[in-house]
Amino acid sequence: MPTESTFLLAGLLVVAAAVGWLFARLPDFRRDEPSESSIGADYLRGLNLVLNRQTDEALELFVQMARVDDETLETHFALGHLFRRRGEVDRAIRVHQNLLARPNLSETQRHQALFSLASDYLGAGLFDRAEKLFTELRSSPTMAEAALRNLVDIYERQHDWERAIEARRKLDSRTGEKSVEVAHYHCELAESARRDGDMTSARRHLRNARRTASGTLRGALIRAAIASEEGEHSRAVTLYRQLLTADRRLMAEILPLLEAACRETGRDGEIERYLEGLIGKDESVKRDIAYAAIVSGLEQAPLLRDCVEEFLLHNDTLAPLIDIEHLKALPPDKRRASIHRICGGLRRLAMSGSRYRCTNCGYSTKGLLWRCPSCKSWESIRPLQVFQFAEMVA
Ligand SMILES: [Zn+2]
């Protein structure tokens, strides 16, 4: 099967052939240059060295060529890219530094070479050097967008959220994108301030996060946590209810927090009345409530208990594992005790496996993350809200 390196080498061959053709057709090009045969021979020798993995010798040959022929530029970019993709970053850096040392590069070529060198530094983990070059390219007519994307990536990796906000805003205004990232950066800053006990800063960042729907949702979770910490339990209840109404996929996250906040307010039956209202609008929410109650260990509360019982007695996957008919025939107190035991088993099953998955790359995780550590996308990780019975027999 052809690999990326194969395609790159094929590209190098095409460029070499094109350069050979050019020298053959345009005599003026040869006026002060080495002869056609020597250029062609050097190329073929260099490519042969690459193919034979004699990369040190190939590198020397191509670096020497760069001093004599402008038309080899694309070939050098391809070679530098090939070295970087192979993990041979030192060689890629040498190729691109050599190009930048050439006096006659056009602005576009110089920016391309700077971008390639910055990408090499990024690949080598030299973030400060990469950042410096990408920052230089922010005003480049040809490389600004790509440079800003790399700057955003660097600042995200370093958790430098202030700089990430600045770079992402510049990128959005340049491309017209309406990204969710800026709101999350503000939420990251708010969470950090909250952890440091600086609630004034936390609230300021949350106000900025509110400018997008994503920021409103995540920001409301943080505001509810702050309200609970500051003893404003009624406000926390209001925020958790708003969150569940906005996105019931967060049921397993929010139900235990809502239950605790309701308990603190001392208003008996508030959570039941709220959940009854949700069920009245859409019966299917009972399944989400049952799942959340089981994984949170809340299956004993009266309304939650009814949802859990209904979930277990009508679950096709559980039916072969549990004697449902026997369970149905038990007197209420014995049935309740059996359901409690079953819920304990299901909870252990849920906690031992993945409960969230990235819709973008399939990455699985046990906890809710706002950014996928694998594909780096924001808000792509969703709760599964189902018990993974396959993991029980794996
Ligand atoms: Zn992902």
Image: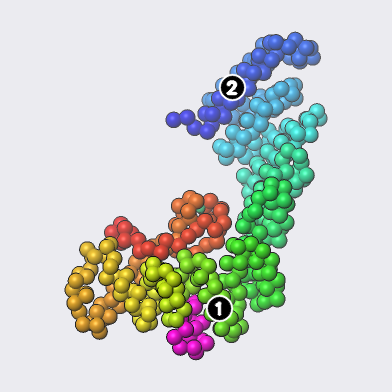
What secondary structure is found at the residue carrying circle 2? helix
Dot 1: within a 10 Å radius of its alpha carbon, few (fewer than 14), some, or many (20 or more) residues? some
Instruction: Residue type at mark 1: give it.
Output: Thr
- Per the image, the residue denoted by label 2 is 13
Quadrant of residue 53 within the rendered picture: top right
Q: Dot 1 lies on which element?
A: helix
Residue 159 location (% of width, % of height): 64, 60
Judge by depth and name the residue closer to the eye, 160 or 184.
184
Q: Residues within 10 Å of mark 2 (few under 14, many from 20)?
A: some
Among numbered discs 2 and 1, the one appearing first in the sequence: 2
State the residue position of label 1.
238
Above or below, comparing residue 339 to residue 103 in the picture:
below
Discs 2/1, front:
1
- Which quadrant holds residue 321? bottom left
Residue 43 screen position, x and y as percent: 63, 19
Q: What label sits on residue 136 in the rendered view?
A: none
Q: Which residues are magenta?
A: 256-271
